[in-house]
Structure formats: C-alpha cells, structure tokens
Amino acid sequence: MYTEYTTTTPATCSAELSSELFARWAAYIDGSERTRDTYTRNVKHFAEWLSVHGITQPTRADVIAYRDELAQEHKPATVHGYIVAVKLFFQWLASEGLYQNITERVKNAKVDPYHKKDPLTSKQAGKVLDSLNLETLAGLRDYALICVMLTTGLRTKSIELANVGDLGTVQGLPVLYYQGKGHTEKADFVKLSEPVRAALSRYLQARGDLLPSSPLFASTANRNGGERITTRSISRIVKNALRAAGLSSERLTAHSLRHTAATLAIQNGATLQEVQQLLGHKNISITMIYLHDLERARNSSADRITAAIFGGGGEQE
C-alpha cells in the first residue's frame, strides 16, 4: 500500500498497520479515547476493503469507489463518518511522508441537517411515562431515566457517564452535572425539576447505599447488576417504553427525547438562546432547526390548496 514511501503492502494492511502504524495514528489524533477508537476502527475498515479488492496502491478513484459502495448499504451520516476518518488518515500519512494524500477534493456524503427523528407531544410523553411499572427497580430506573432525558435533553452518552455524585445544587436548585459532547470533564449542568428530582430520589433509595462514583443509572440484570448501563441499553430501554405506549416508529428513538425537550421548550415560551444553552449547542443555527420544524408544521399552505381544490375555493374558469 505504501510502495511510494515504504515497503508495506496492502496484504498486510489489516495486520501491520493495526499494530504499528495505527498506534502512531491513534496517538496523533487529538481527541478522547472514544474518538480515537472510532477513527481507527473506520480507517481499518477501509484497509480491509482495499485488501478484499486486491488494491496495492490506492488512488483517489479508489476512495471514491469505497465511498459510493458504502452509500449503497449505509445512511449518509455513517458514510460521512467513515470518509472523514479516511481523509484525516491520509492527511496524516502525507504529513509524515508515508504516502500521498489521495483524498484531496474527495466529496463526502451529504448529510441532511434536518432531524431524522420525531419529537413526542406532551401527551405522548405522558403515555410513555404511564406505561412504566413503578413496582420494580427496573421500572423506577426507567421512569427516572426517561424523566431526565425528556426534561433536560441530555444525550444518551451523557446519561451513561452520569454518577450519583454528579447530583448537586446550584443556588439551592437541584442539578445534574454532565459531560457534554466533545468534553472530557463534567463542567456543565442541567436543572432538575421537582418531579424529576423526586423520581431520581425514589430510584436511588430503592438501590440502597451508593458511593458518589456509583453510576446514576445501573443495570438490573443478574449477570451485571449494579454496573453502568451503556448507550445501547439506554436506547433499548427507551424504545421498549415507546412501544409499550403504542408508539412504534423508526423515527421514534432515544434521540427523540432530546428533540422533545427542545420542541416543548420552544412551544411553551423558551427563547432560542435558552434552548441552545439547554442542549449545549455551540452554534445557534443548529438550535434554529427546531424552530424551523415547528414553523413548517404550522404552515397551512397545504390546507389552503386543499380547500381551493376540494372545498369550493371559487376558482374562475
């Protein structure tokens, strides 16, 4: 693969590169361990693709072919992640004098900035909470977890990383400190309303004595009871609760709870700046998407057209 600068061949991409070159590449990435793992895994996927296709000297055309093949099986956001990693990898190779940057001017997958998941209405949110069995520890956990997500808009990763010791007060108000996207410390916080604080209190009391380092939300399974739940588990918990409430749709997921928090906040008088702060958006243009969604939903143009065609709109011949 690197004949121009080194003797490494594509046949050893998945082996040699994973041990030495990938270690150097991972050390170069300026990001969290999770980010390094994701980028490295995505680049290894490209190396394996080259090996399967017998490509010894990858070119720009090969990167484009790889991108187009990915697009046949994956969503644009997934393709985007793979290609970003490959681009960064070859930029680094070129800076190290190991291989030319063959990814220059390679277009990435176009990711639609609009939401792929739907928010819940306030009535639907209530149905989801009512569907949970508060007579079990799992039910108390799921109720508290979904309450937090619905009212704070926290991402699943922030929920996963939350500890009991992250609960605190600011100016006498209950809050939860959390680690936001792209951050390494829990420097931000969200306020917890009284019903949410009460739900957390009931759940934590049911768990018994806990340390500050104990996970805020823990597994109740026999094999790993008390251990931190993962983002995958959180997604499953929310999806099961949605289905139990009769809300079964591919557009309704755990991420819908974040959209719900933003949408309900705007509908009930919150400013864009307040919602931006709630969700931790760096750019308010991202927050404005929620307002645009609401405005499009309220657009009555289709109703006017329908009335004109089917309701005797008085059109002149």
Image: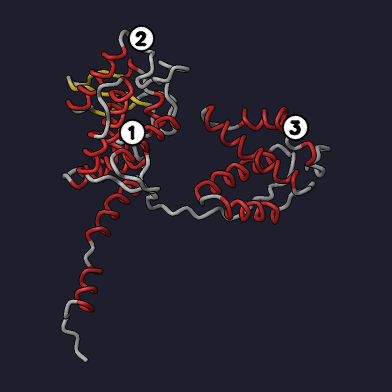
The residue at which mark 2 appears reads as 211
Q: Residue furthest top?
A: 209
**Is 88 on the left or on the right of 176, as rendered?**
right
Q: How is the image coloured?
A: secondary structure
On the image, which quarter does residue 39 sit in?
top right
Q: Is disc 2 surrounded by few (<14), some (14 to 19) or many (20+) residues within 10 Å?
A: few
Q: CA distance from mark 1 to mark 3?
A: 39 Å
Q: Nearer the viewer, residue 24 or 128?
A: 128
Residue 264 drawn at (x, y percent):
22, 43
Q: Which residue is mark 3?
A: 15
- Tag 3: Cα neighbours inside 10 Å, few (<14), some, or many (≥20)? some
Which quadrant: the N terminus?
A: top right
Residue 281, given in percent of the width and then of the height, sits at 35, 40
Q: Amino acid at mark 1?
A: Leu
Query: Which residue does the numbered mark 1 point to in the structure image?
Result: 154
Between residue 179 and residue 238, name the one nearer to us.
Answer: 238
* Disc 3 + disc 2, Cβ < 8 Å: no
Count of residue discs: 3
First-in-chain label (3 vs 2):
3
Tell me what residue is drawn at x 28 percent, y 40 percent: 245
Q: Amino acid at mark 2?
A: Leu
Amino acid at pointer 3: Ala
Secondary structure of the residue carrying tag 1 is loop
Q: Judge whether 217 appears above or below 127 on screen.
A: above
* Left-right relation of 14 to 69: right
The structure residue drawn at horizontal position 28% and vertical position 42%, both measured from the top left corner, is 260
Horizontal and vertical percent position of residue 4 = 81, 44
Contact check, label 1 and label 3, Cβ < 8 Å: no
Q: Where residue 20 sits: x, y (%)?
A: 72, 28
> Which of these two is toward me, 98 or 18?
18
